[in-house]
Image: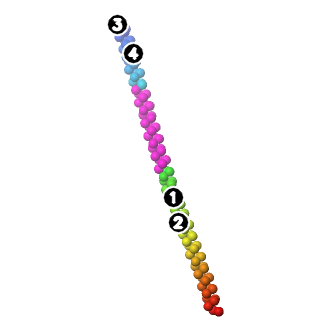
Amino acid sequence: MSDATTTQQQYREQFTAAGQATQEAFQAANEVALATAEWTLRTTEQGLRFSQDLRNQNDRIAQDAFATYRRCYEDGLRNWQGYVQSVTGIMNRSLDRR
């Protein structure tokens, strides 16, 4: 009977060791999955933040470019208006002298 008890005890120890190894493997796989999910979410969030920052910068650049173009266009119109008024004034003076 001692041989049967010893054999049974060996099986129990082996079964316990196998169960422990399986549990540790599942725990390790769970930790890897959790770390992978956290890394993926953090990386995605960072990518979205960078994209949003880049879009905001592009919007500001476009607005600044449009404002500069508008100022140049308005300055050109004012200069043209001043030129036309000067030419008109010269023509009126020359007509008045006649």
Whichever of callouts 2 and 3 sits on the residue coming sooner in the sequence is 3
Dot 4 corresponds to which residue?
11
Whichever of callouts 2 and 4 sits on the residue coming sooner in the sequence is 4
Whichever of callouts 1 and 2 sits on the residue coming sooner in the sequence is 1
Is residue 20 within the magenta segment? Answer: no
The label nearer to you, 2 versus 4, is 2
Looking at the image, which residue sits at the far top?
Answer: 1
Whichever of callouts 3 and 1 sits on the residue coming sooner in the sequence is 3
Q: Amino acid at mark 4?
A: Tyr
Disc 2 from disc 3: Cα separation: 98 Å
| 2 and 4 marks in contact (CB < 8 Å) | no
* Residue drawn at the location 45% of the way across and 44% of the way down: 42
Disc 1 from disc 2: Cα separation: 12 Å
Disc 3 from disc 1: Cα separation: 86 Å
Dot 3 corresponds to which residue?
1
Q: Which residues are magenta?
A: 23-49
- Decide whether the magenta segment is chiefly helix, strand or loop: helix
* CA neighbours of label 4 inside 10 A, class few (<14), some (14 to 19), many (20+): few
Mark 1 element type = helix
State whether residue 65 is above or below residue 42. Answer: below
The circle drawn on residue 67 is 2
Q: Amino acid at mark 2?
A: Ala
The label nearer to you, 3 versus 1, is 1
Q: Amino acid at mark 1?
A: Asp
* Residue drawn at the location 55% of the way across and 72% of the way down: 74
Position in image of residue 28 (x %, y %): 43, 31
Position in image of residue 83 (x %, y %): 60, 79
Disc 2 from disc 4: Cα separation: 83 Å
The circle drawn on residue 59 is 1
